[in-house]
Amino acid sequence: SGAGKSTLLNLIGGMDTPTKGSIEIDGEDISKYNENELSEYRAENIGFIFQFYNILPTLTVLENVDIVKEIVKNPIDSKEAIKDVGLIEHINQLSGGEQQRVSIARAIAKNPKLLLCDEPTGALDSKTGVEVLKLLKKQCDGNNGANTVIIVTHNSLFADIADTVIRVKNGKIESVVKNQEPKKIDEVKW
């Protein structure tokens, strides 16, 4: 806690701007973007799964996921994304875990090049968490492997399945390790 993981995601996602240095994403220095350019960057390239869901309580599950259709050109079908997270039967009252899955469905439906996940399985039981990780892996493999999924978490087991593990401590990157043989999600004992 307090290492700077969420801040790092906000910087990569163009929600925060650095006080110094630069942020290069896909060959572009987004730290030089103005507010309009950052909005366009987020709309066209970034998906967020927030730790605290950020769903709109006055909207149905479908309406919360359908929001992405207003900002992206190539969304995935909202009902398919809702089905993928196991909520096709839940339209009204949602538990914390179900709200988290709505947030995940919305992010996946956007079909982003870069999906930023802040503790995406934190409110989920281990079985549902494994299913969500499989969806995130599927997202990562999308567009012929051109998509990227970045997950920040306290759960050290994620390192076993990751292609690259970046450890952050006291606001600085402590290490970057390429995982030569990532395990399959089902191989890890959650």
Image: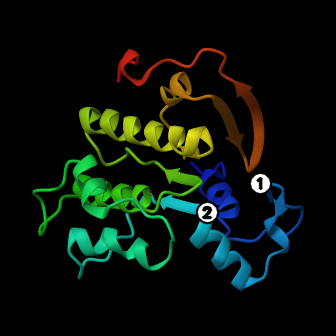
Element under disc 1: loop
Kindly identify the residue that appears in the image at 18 percent across and 54 percent down: 87
Marks 1,2: beta carbons within 8 A: yes
The residue where tag 1 is placed is 26
Q: Where is residue 118 in the image (x, y as percent from the top left)?
A: 50, 52
Image quarter in which the C terminus is found: top left
Classify 150 as above or below 179.
Answer: below
Q: Which of marks 1 and 2 is nearer the N terminus?
A: 1
Q: Position of residue 125 (x, y in %)?
A: 25, 38
Crowd class of label 2 (few under 14; some 14 to 19; many from 20; radius 10 Å): some
Element under disc 2: helix
Q: Nearer the viewer, residue 107 or 17?
A: 107
Classify 63 as above or below 5.
Answer: below
* C-alpha distance separating marks 1 and 2: 10 Å
Q: Residue furthest right?
A: 21
Kindly identify the residue that appears in the image at 56 percent across and 27 percent down: 159
